Amino acid sequence: MHVLIVQSNAELGKIWKRHLERLNARVVHVETGQHALALVQSDSFDVVVIDLVLKEGSPLTVADFVQFRQPRANVVFVTDTTFFSDGSIFSHSANARALIETATPPADLAAIVHHYGCPSHAGVERAS
């Protein structure tokens, strides 16, 4: 399983990366939307974890680009705000599979990402 983490908080990104590596995932962590877009052009990912509050770049642009370039990749959004708490993120991003709080324990985040990165869940279609 290959995972891209787009998280502006370097320390938090490292923690998530370590937890995912314990589940044998290959993980790349970037801090900006621009770096994420460049990686999505040059590499393929099973799951992309995107913080909805990036210091640089638009998380929804990253998710849209992932959908365009890698339609089988699943996106897990994380946030520390209540902005999309109504579930509307799933209307804005076709490849969104989960929206979780940034404060979610890293082991739980890793389990969710692993779930959506397993071959049986890669490219999961949401029910209409």
Image (tube, rainbow, N blue to C red):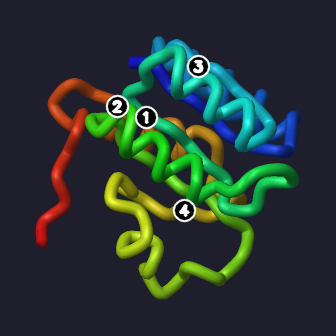
Question: What residue did someone put label 2 on?
Answer: 117
Q: Quadrant of the C terminus?
A: bottom left
> Which residue position holds label 4?
100
2 or 3: tag closer to the N-terminus: 3
**Mark sitting on residue 27:** 3
User: In the image, what residue type sits under mark 3?
Assistant: Val
Give me the residue at 50% from left, 38% from top.
Answer: 48
Please state which of residues 41 and 93 is positioned toward the viewer in this rendering. Answer: 41
**Which residue is at the front of the view, 61 or 82?**
61
Q: Which tag, 3 or 1, sits closer to the chain's start?
A: 3
Q: CA distance from mark 3 to mark 1?
A: 10 Å
Q: Is residue 85 left or right of residue 105?
A: left
Q: Do tag 2 and tag 1 residues touch (Cβ < 8 Å)?
A: yes
Mark 2 in CB contact with mark 4 (< 8 angstroms): no
In the image, residue 50 lies at what x, y percent?
Answer: 61, 48
**Residue at image coords 45%, 40%:** 66
**Circle 3: element type:** strand
Residue 47, disc: 1
Element carrying mark 4 = strand
**Eyeballing the image, is 95 above or below 53?**
above
* Kind of residue sitting beneath label 2: Gly
Q: Quadrant of residue 20?
A: top right
The mark nearer the N terminus, 2 or 1, is 1
Whole-number angstrom distance, CA of label 3 to CA of label 4: 19 Å
Where is 102 relative to 2, above or below? below
